[in-house]
Image: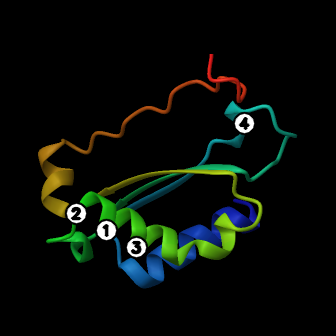
Amino acid sequence: MGLTETSIHNKLSERLKPIHLDVINESNMHNVPKGSETHFKVIIVSDLFNGKSLLQRHRMVNELLAEELSGSVHALSIQAKTSQQWEDSNHHITKSPPCLGGSGK
């Protein structure tokens, strides 16, 4: 686990008290140098999300990771769920699409 990945994990763990947390470095799926920490997926389940809209949950995560997002992190995919949503989805994690190389084609 690299420094950025560790920082993301620690901040989310400390502040959002997740029931489940995965921080996945997806940089290897993109055209970046080996060992990069530029593209991440976060799967986070927290009771602090109860009563919050999806937009509010994403804002909570983005605010905590403002330093990383203003630095080396180019892309952040967030799946933020309540514990009930997590159970109802049978712990389903949406697969990331393949990289299109920035062209969108």
What type is the residue that disc 3 sits on?
Met
Which one is closest to the eye, mark 1 or mark 4? Answer: 1
Q: Marks 4 and 1: in contact by CB < 8 Å?
A: no
Q: Residue furthest right?
A: 33
Do tag 1 and tag 3 residues touch (Cβ < 8 Å)? yes
Q: CA distance from mark 2 to mark 1?
A: 5 Å
Q: Is residue 24 visible?
A: yes
Mark on residue 60?
A: 3
Q: Secondary structure at mark 2?
A: loop
Is residue 99 left or right of 59 when viewed as pictured? Answer: right
- Above or below, 102 relative to 36: above
Q: Residue at x 51, y 27 (%)?
A: 97
Q: Is 12 displayed left or right of 67 in the figure?
A: left
**Please, what is the three-letter code of the amino acid marked with disc 1?**
Gln
The Cα atoms of the two marked residues, 4 and 2, are separated by: 31 Å
Q: What numbered label is drawn on residue 28? A: 4
In percent of width and height, residue 54 lies at 27, 58
Q: Residue 57, relative to residue 11: is it above or below?
A: above
Disc 4 or 3, which lies upstream in sequence? 4
Q: Quadrant of the C terminus?
A: top right
Mark 4 or 2: in front is: 2
Residue under label 1? 56
Element on which disc 3 rests: helix
- For mark 1, give the secondary structure: helix
Q: In 3D space, how far apart are the residues under numbered discs 1 and 4 (Cα atoms)?
A: 29 Å
